[in-house]
Image (cartoon, rainbow, N blue to C red):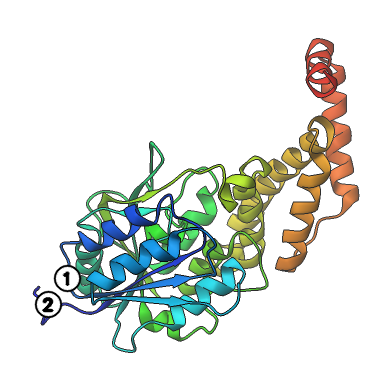
Amino acid sequence: MNQKTEPLVSVITPFFNTEKYISECIESVLTQTYTNWEYILLNNCSTDRSLQIAQGYADREPRIRLISNDSFLGQVQNYNRALCLMSPKSKYCKIVQADDWIFPECLIEMVNVAESHPTVGVVGSYWLRGNDLMGGGLPYPSTFMTGIDVGKWQLLNHPDKHILTQPTAHLIRSDLIRAQDPFYDEDIKDYEDYDVWFRVLQTSDFGFVHKVLTFQRVDAGSISGEIRNYFPHLLSSFICLKKYGMSYLSENEYIERYRYISDRYFIALAKTCLFEKYAREVWNYHNNVLNGSGCSIKKLVIAGYVLRELLELLRHPKLLNKILRRIFG
């Protein structure tokens, strides 16, 4: 492909106070071997030097559009606003989160797969999460999987394995974004990027590049870093299974998977209630996310798991003493 035949890709980076990483993110887009792109940088009222850094790049590169919000938006609302800024001529969209970056071949490899399979709505690849290689699941050298099959695979393997994940790792067809306004559900919290793939893949298919194309930063100061100890992937797995399980799985598959995931999830909650100093914060977090998703769990169910864990500990006094010393010093 050359620029005359390359479809337009809208690359989008919403940002807020990311001066430490924003240059690396922008540079990764500027060094793409693919050339027909626009780059939308949306500043969410940053108070550090992020805006000045972004402005320096926008002044030198005409394909960059730098826009600032008049007032601060929540993260999901900010991403939805950024997506609304895409050119109507855009065929594909590539979100690059401001503390992440993409490898030089990212756009061309993902677009090539999408162009080879007209029904593909989402393209993924392997990605680095810090030093860890992520994204395994599709058998090599397959570059295509039906949306129903990949949704099923993910529901049966998450949270231990990932094909579907955070936005930087995927390319998405722009018409699928325009068809859903807003694209990300603003009523749910902390798993909106995982949830949206299950909505999209009910009506489109999935492409995959067997190369490492994106990098996700592991940052304890980020929103995802702050909740990492609250086992959010297990929470999102539980919720998405309840919401989408019957759309992708057979009845027997759903029943078996729900039994397995709910057991893991309730045990994790029970152990937190028993042994962690921050138990109240964890419970409040999970309760808020569950309520926002339209899901709920009965306290009596968790109480049963707490009792089960207590009885198990009574069989191992040394372990119980060790845990009590850790909690109470």
Residue 27 drawn at (x, y percent): 27, 57
In this image, 297 relative to 268: left or right? right
Residue 327 drawn at (x, y percent): 81, 24
Above or below 292: residue 314 = above
Q: Which mark is residue 251?
A: none
Which part of the image, by quadrant, shows the C terminus? top right
Q: Residue at label 2?
A: 3
Above or below 289: residue 119 = below
Confirm or deny contact between disc 1 and disc 2 (CB under 8 A): yes
Q: Nearer the viewer, residue 201 or 133?
A: 133
Residue 62 drawn at (x, y percent): 23, 77
| Numbered label tally | 2
Q: Residue at label 1?
A: 35
Residue type, label 1: Thr
Mark 1 crowd level (few <14, some 14–19, many ≥20, 10 Å Cα): many
Q: Secondary structure at mark 1?
A: loop
Tell me which corner region of the image, top left, top right, bottom left or bottom right, holds residue 172. bottom left
Residue 171 visible here: no
Residue that protrudes farthest toward the bottom in the picture: 88
Tell me which corner region of the image, top left, top right, bottom left or bottom right, holds residue 287. bottom right
Q: Earlier in the sequence, mark 1 or mark 2?
A: 2
Q: Residue at x 23, y 69 (%)?
A: 111
Q: Residue at x 44, y 72 (%)?
A: 42
Residue 78 visible here: yes
In this image, 321 relative to 117: left or right? right
Q: Secondary structure at mark 2?
A: loop
In this image, 112 relative to 185: left or right? left
Q: Residue at x 25, y 51 (%)?
A: 210
Residue type, label 2: Gln
